Amino acid sequence: MPAYLSRREFARLLQLGLLLPLAQPIVASAPGYNFRIRTITAGLNMNSSADLGEAVEAVGFLRSAKSTYEKQGYEVQTLRLATQPMWQYLPDWTNSKSLSTIKELDRFAVDNNVSISIGPVNSDNSYHPEFADWATELIRQTNNLSFTVNMASTEGGIHHKSIKAAAEAILTIGRGTEGGVGNFRFAANAFTPPGTPFFPAAYFDNGRSFSLGLETPNLLKAAFTGATGLEDAKQKLRTAMNNALNPVADLARQMAGKSGWQYLGIDASPAPGLDSSIGTAIETLTGLPFGSHKTLSGCAAITDVLKSLEVQTCGYSGLMLPIMEDSTLALRAEQGLFSVSELLLYSSVCGTGLDVVPIPGDTKTDTVAALLTDVAALANKYSKPLSARLFPAPGKLARETVSFDNPHLTDAVVMPIS
C-alpha cells in the first residue's frame, strides 16, 4: 500500500478499480465467486465454563467444514464458536473468579485460531454499577472473545436498567482500551435470535449446531448493475442470491447429515468488507450517493429480497450498515450526507441498528443511554433484531478523523449525535 494513502483511501480506490494490481491477491482467493463466506459459526452447550470437551469437537467440525467449502472454491474467512448465554453456565459473573474462568475460554479460542462469543451476560432488566469496570477488564485481558448485554425482550419490553449498564460499559471500554477499539467486541442487543453467526451478537441455545454468515455486497452490486428500475433490480438480486446461496446451503446440509451437527441456516445479511462495500451496492441501486433521497427505499428493497430467499435463513438476515467497516459509508459520513438519527431511520426497514459508529469521546452516559433506548424502542416496536456497537473516540470531537489499529476498520469521522 502506498505510504501516502490511508486505509479508507486505499479501500475506496479498490472499489473504483484504480488499484487492481494491488487488489488482485485479495479478490482472486475465491475464483468464480463474487462473495465470501464470512464465518462458519458452531454452537456450544457449556455445562460449565471449564468444560471444553464439546469445544474441542466443535473446532474439529469447523475445520472440516472449512476444508469442504474451500475444495469447492469458496473463501472462508473465519471460524467461530458461540455458547449459550453466559448467565446460564456462569450465573455469578460478579464473582472474583469469573474473569479468570472466562479467560480460559479465550485462551482456548486463541490457541485454536477461532473467535468465541459468550453471548449476553444478563437475562433480565438489571443494573450493576461494577459491570462497566468488569466488562473493560474482560476486554483488556482477552483477545478473541465477544459478549453482549440484552436491552429489550418480548417479556420485559425495554430494559432501561440494563441500558444504563451498557452505556457505562461502552464509555468505560472506550476510555480503557487503546483508541477505544475494545468496543469492537461488545454490543447492546435487542431481539437477536439464537443461532446468529455474526459477532458480537452471536449466541446459541443448543450445542452441536452451526450457521453461516456471508459477505455479499459485490454480488449485490453486480445484480443491480444495468437494472432498469427498482422491481427489476429486486428480481435480479433475488435470482442472483438464490443461485449463489443454494449450493452453499446444499453443502451445509450434506455436512449436517454426515456429522450429526444441526444446520440452522444462512444469515443472508450482506456483511461488507473493505473491498466489498454495501454502500457502493446501494448507490448502484439508487444511482445516488448513500444518504441521499431514495436511500431508505433502496434499503427497504434489499431487505424485501433478503426476507424472500429460497434458502433456510437465520440470524439478522437484514441489511448491515457498519460505518467503520465500509469505506463508502465512512466517506458519505465524512461528507455529512447522513446522521446517526438517519441510520436509525434506515434500521426501521432493514438492518442491525447502530453498528461500529464513531461518536465523540466526551459523550455523556445519559446521551449514550438515550441512543441505546432508541435502538431498543425500534426493536421492541417491530420485534426485530437490532444491536448497537458505539465507538466513543477518546480525545476526539465531532467531525474529527479517527483511525483504529484494526485491519477490519477503515478511517472515519466522528459522527455528531445531535
Image: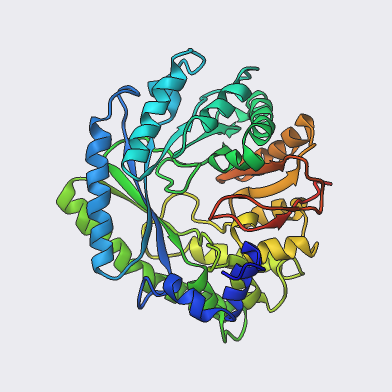
Is 377 positioned to the left or the right of 195 in the image? Answer: right
Which residue occupies the extreme front position in the image? 3
Q: Examine the rendered structure and indicate whether residue 56 appears above or below residue 244.
A: above
Which of these two is toward me, 304 or 98?
98
Q: Residue placed at 67% from the left, 43% from the top?
A: 391
Q: Residue placed at 50% from the left, 42% from the top?
A: 200
Colour logic: rainbow
The answer to whether residue 413 of the structure is visible from this angle is: yes
Q: Residue placed at 59% from the left, 28% from the top?
A: 136
Q: Provide residue 241's location: percent of width, then percent of height.
A: 43, 70
Is 157 positioned to the left or the right of 199 in the image? Answer: right
Which residue occupies the extreme right position in the image? 418
Residue 359 occupies quadrant: top right
Which of these two is toward me, 398 or 120?
398
Which of these two is toward me, 2 or 165?
2
Q: Examine the rendered structure and indicate whether residue 267 appears above or below residue 360.
A: below
Residue 233 occupies quadrant: bottom right
Q: Provide residue 190's location: percent of width, then percent of height.
A: 57, 38
Which residue occupies the extreme top position in the image? 95
Which of these two is toward me, 166 or 375?
166
Residue 45 occupies quadrant: top left
Q: Provide residue 97's location: percent of width, then percent of height.
A: 44, 14
Q: Examine the rendered structure and indicate whether residue 113 appears above or below residue 37.
A: above
Is 288 positioned to the left or the right of 13 in the image? Answer: right
Q: Provide residue 10's location: percent of width, then percent of height.
A: 61, 69
Q: Residue placed at 58% from the left, 75% from the top?
A: 15
- Give the total number of marks visible in the rendering: 0
The answer to whether residue 223 of the structure is visible from this angle is: no
Q: Quadrant of the N terminus?
A: bottom right
Q: Examine the rendered structure and indicate whether residue 286 appears above or below residue 58.
A: below
